Every structure is written in structure tokens, then in C-alpha cells.
Image (tube, rainbow, N blue to C red):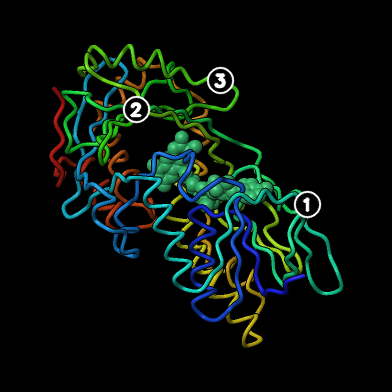
Amino acid sequence: MREIDLAVIGGGYAGMACAAAAAARGVRTVVLDRKPAPGSKPHTTGILVKEVADAWDVPRYLTRKIAGVRLYAPGGASFDLYSPGYYFLATDTPGVLRWLAQRAKVRGAAVRFGEHIEGFKRQHDRWLIRPTDLVTRWVVGADGARSMVARQAGLGVNRRFLVGVEAAFENVRGVDGDHLHVFVDSQLAPGYIAWVVPGVSETQVGLACKANRAPQLNRFLQQLSKRFDFTHAVEVSRRRGLIPVGGLVRRTSREGVMLIGDAAGMVSPLTAGGIHTALGYGRVAGVALADHLLDGGPDPAAVLRRSVKPFGFKQAMRWAIDRQPPNALVDAMLKLGPVRALAQAVFYHHRGLMSRAAWRDLAAGCFGHSPNHNTCP
Ligand SMILES: Cc1cc2nc3c(=O)[nH]c(=O)nc-3n(C[C@H](O)[C@H](O)[C@H](O)COP(=O)(O)OP(=O)(O)OC[C@H]3O[C@@H](n4cnc5c(N)ncnc54)[C@H](O)[C@@H]3O)c2cc1C
């Protein structure tokens, strides 16, 4: 048996951020993931918000800056949203995941792929990780939306999901590379949106909808062929996955075990973005674990709980979106200044209506002095 301090189950965004922070401080850390290698079979579009770009030095060659959002109403009209100085990063997702794994290794974590963890068992004051040779003081469940760690430890589990599907193409023409193209259509993508992302080397086309519906990617592709040129397009990969949108799970820790990232429901119920929170809270967890394990600091799960911001407004918006307003109403609403201002707040203010900047944009949208270059053809 090999004795360690921390076993991180899941080598995605949350797991690698946590492991790197803990290992850098001297915690004996092992990351275990069932995939054959870091970055293989990604299930995410991988868009990073600017806040991630500011906090994490993701190498430039793995990213592509996109400043604008072009929002398409169901009837086909579109308008553009910008926020001065703000941008999103499309990413080479496998490349970013490999970079995160390498970063964790450099900081001292052992990273073991091809290890499907079946469970863990209490042995005195340690956990025995099955089927491995590891005995650990703490287990972190960073194992995604359907967390095995959560179920085994009797913690809270995600109950509300969107299902997302995406295809990546080479040689799509006519896609304006300065915008994320976002399609609102309650028939095509009930409960969420469809998208076209001019990525680093490919064009990513996807949609997500409520988990009780089958995502109609082929129907969306047919619609898109009238707008963009797919004549020479070659599909190079497909991704699919569940997005938990029910907010934080009820119980995220017990003695010697804690959940982070999707496993804990740390995903915006409104935008369904989870990479920013997976990285940020993963790092907080890693630092808190190091303080606790090395210096007898406070319970790391309590430290993490205190730092997690509730999704209050976003959860209320999720409720409204789940009601699926008919397309005719969506068309009418997207012509209104205040609704466009709300869209601006959703895309560009990740603290939502809790931020002063969001209120400034909302007021501008309502009273006609929008700082953005909204256009409606
Ligand atoms: C189609 C789609 C598009 C998305 N697009 C975006 C986006 O553009 N921007 C954004 O911010 N968010 C997006 N999200 C959400 C985002 O991908 C997740 O919130 C994020 O990946 C969460 O990271 P994580 O590390 O918590 O979990 P994951 O990325 O799911 O990583 C979990 C890891 O655990 C491993 N694992 C699971 N079970 C076991 C086990 N038993 N043993 C060993 N290993 C195990 C898995 O192999 C996996 O590597 C999208 C999600 C989907 C489905």
C-alpha cells in the first residue's frame, strides 16, 4: 500500500486545479482518471470567460479571442452584443486539458490516467481507493456530473441536467470569426441555446436542451446550411455530455471527502458554464486542503463552502427558461431594449445582477443609452 495525503478522483478542470494547488504546497497528491490520457474524449465546448484568461495563464496558442456575441432570434433576425475590453476564449480543449495535467505534474502531483475508480473504503482514519494501491487521508470527488464519489460517500447528487451535443468541422465558410453565434429557439433547443463557435482550428456547432429531449443536431445543421457554407466542410469529431443545472448539490462533504466542480453542481444554472467555477473553486479547495493537512488549518470543506457564491438569480432565470416561452414571444421580446440589456448582463457580467456594471448596462438598455453596438437587421 502507498500512503498519500490526497486522492483527487477526476482529472478535468476542477481536479487538476485542486491537485496543482495542493501539490504545490507540499501535499502528497495523486490524480486518478479513467480516460486513457488527458484531453481525450472531451465533452465540452471549452469556451473560457475573460475572468479565466485573467487568472490562469493559458498559453495563447491554445486559444482564440472572440469579443462579440451575435444573438439570433427564432425568426432569423440577429443583433450583436459587445462589452468594451471583454472577450471570450475559444480553446483547443484537449490541448488545455493536457496543459492543466502537465501544470499539476510540474507542481508535484502524480497524474495517473487509465484508472477507473470503483469506490473507496474507510480503513481506520484513512480511505482505501479501489482498485488501486493507494491509502489516503482525503478524497476529492472531481468526477463530473454523475459523480461516483458523491454516491459512494452518501453526498448530494445532481438531479437536473441539460444534455449537450457538439460536432467540430474543418472548412466551414462564411462564419464571422469575431462573434460567438448564439441561436435562441425553444423548438430546437428547449431550455438552452444552439451555437456556432469559430474555434482555434475548427468550427464547433452544437446545441443543448433539457435532458428529457433528444438534441436535434442534424436539424440544426440543416438550418445552418442556409446561413453558412458547409459545401467543403468535414466533420472531424463529436462531443456529448450532461450539464448539471440544478445548482449546488445539497451536501458537498463528509469526514475526509469533498466534492468540487460538476460533481458538486458548481455550474451556472443559467449559462451552463462550469469551467470558470471548476477551476476557481478547485484551486480554493486545494489551498484549503493544504492548510488543513499540513498545518492543522480549519475543515477545508467548510472553507470552500464559505467561498462559494450562491446561484440565486441564475436559478430563478433557469426556472423561467424551463417554462419554454413560444418562439413568437421570444422573437417579440428580443426586439425590446430591456431584454437585450438583460442578454448583455447574462453574457458579459458573470456575477449577474449582483454587479454594478450589469445594472449600468441594464439601465442603459431600458433608457436608450446602451454602451454597446446593438444592431438588428
Ligand atoms: C456539450 C457541453 C458543452 C459545454 N461547454 C462549456 C463551455 O463552453 N464553457 C464552460 O464554462 N462550460 C461548458 N460546459 C460545462 C463544463 O464542461 C463543465 O462544467 C466542466 O467540464 C466541469 O469540469 P469538472 O472538472 O468538474 O468535470 P469534468 O470535466 O466532467 O471532469 C471529470 C473527470 O472525471 C473523470 N471520471 C469520472 N468518473 C470517474 C471514475 N469513476 N474514475 C476515474 N475518473 C473518473 C472523467 O473521465 C473526467 O475526466 C459544457 C458542458 C457540455 C456537456
Task: Answer whether residue 270 is visible to the viewer in this image.
Answer: no
Identify the mark at residue 205; answer none if there is no mark.
2
Q: Label 2 is placed on what type of residue? A: Val
- Identity of the residue drawn at 27% across and 42% down: 344
| Left or right position of 194 against 149 | left
Q: Label 1 is placed on what type of residue? A: Gln
**Residue at numbered disc 1:** 152
Nearer-N-terminus badge (3/1): 1
SS of the residue under disc 2? strand
Q: Disc 3 to disc 1, how far (Cα)?
A: 29 Å
Foreground of the two, 368 or 344:
344
Mark 2 or 3, closer to the camera: 2
SS of the residue under disc 3? loop
| Left or right position of 268 against 366 | right
- Point out the residue furthest to the right here: 124
Q: In this view, does 319 lie above or below 34?
A: above
Residue 205 x, y percent position in the rendering: 34, 27
Q: Label 3 is placed on what type of residue? A: Arg
**Residue at numbered disc 3:** 213
Q: In this view, does 370 lie above or below 97?
A: above
Query: Which quadrant does the C terminus fall into?
Result: top left
Q: Is residue 307 above or below residue 329?
A: below
Task: Answer whether residue 149 is visible to the viewer in this image.
Answer: yes
Nearer-N-terminus badge (2/1): 1
Residue 138 x, y percent position in the rendering: 70, 69
| Left or right position of 317 against 36 | left
Foreground of the two, 349 or 59:
59
The image quadrant that residue 124 belongs to is bottom right
- Identity of the residue drawn at 69% across and 64% down: 139
